Image: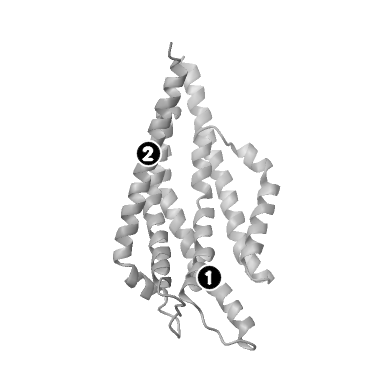
Amino acid sequence: MVNPNDQSLIGHLDEMRSRLIRTLAAFLVAMAAAFIYVKDIYQWLVRNMDQKLVLLGPSDVIWVYMMIAGVVAIAVTLPIAAYQAWKFVTPAIPKEAQRAALLFIPGISLLFIIGICFGYFILFPMVLHFMNQMAAQSFVTMYTAQNYFTFMIHMTVPFGLLFEMPAIVMFLTKLGLLNPNRLAKARKLAYFILALVAITITPPDILSDIIVIVPLFLLYEISISISKIVYRKQLKLAGEGGMTA
């Protein structure tokens, strides 16, 4: 006799696989489209450089273009991935909350772009200037294209992901996995982790650390505020449902 629970599990796994395949397909299509315009994107990214970047091998240019196209594809695919995740967990969300939960899809894309812009326009030039000053007196600075863009991605993409914090907290609060009380109790640990991340990726001076730490702390506090709003609405809906019953 077939166990209904096993059938349900197989059905969930099949659905998860299909949604992962759709997300991967969207990523590949977006990457292929970005690759068509990758030279223009590259020229814009190096517009302020005084010298051309160096290639050490014939395949380096492919890796550089792949990295650039990959980041663009991630930004384009994020709302699709978020939608697929939302559709997968929709049965677990009350109907009254589904419309509000759907708002996190454009929000997650916007926050990723804001985080990328923060890393690219503020953090990356600040760290690059600091490194150039350190090397100016003793070295001739010559960047390879692969190392330059690897460094740029390390200074931008992590912040795109870190800036997703409010949207992820809202989503997890909708699912009942988080609440503002838990987030408030974990504040000290969260601050410590965020400060450690900021200090690790910034130059060794207090001003750079503060420039990165303050936005991360603000993001955490915004996340707690969003969680409070969502949690109160859920309690209100639950109370109304109990009264109706």
Determine whether, in the image, residue 60 is placed left or right of residue 222.
left
Q: What residue does disc 1 label?
A: 124
| Vertical arrangement, residue 71 with respect to residue 91, above or below | below
Residue shown at 53% from the left, 43% from the top = 169
Crowd around label 2: few <14 · some 14–19 · many ≥20 (10 Å): some
| Residue farthest to the front, as pictured | 58
Judge whether residue 181 can be spotted in this image.
Answer: yes
Kindly indicate whether the residue at mark 1 contacts the one at mark 2 (C-beta within 8 angstroms): no
Q: Amino acid at mark 1?
A: Phe
Q: What residue does disc 2 label?
A: 19
Quarter holding the N terminus? top left
Q: Position of residue 12 (x, y in %)?
A: 42, 29
Circle 1 sits in a helix, a strand or a loop, which is it? helix
Q: Amino acid at mark 2?
A: Arg
**Which label's residue is closer to the chain start, 2 or 1?**
2
| Vertical arrangement, residue 151 with respect to residue 163, above or below | below
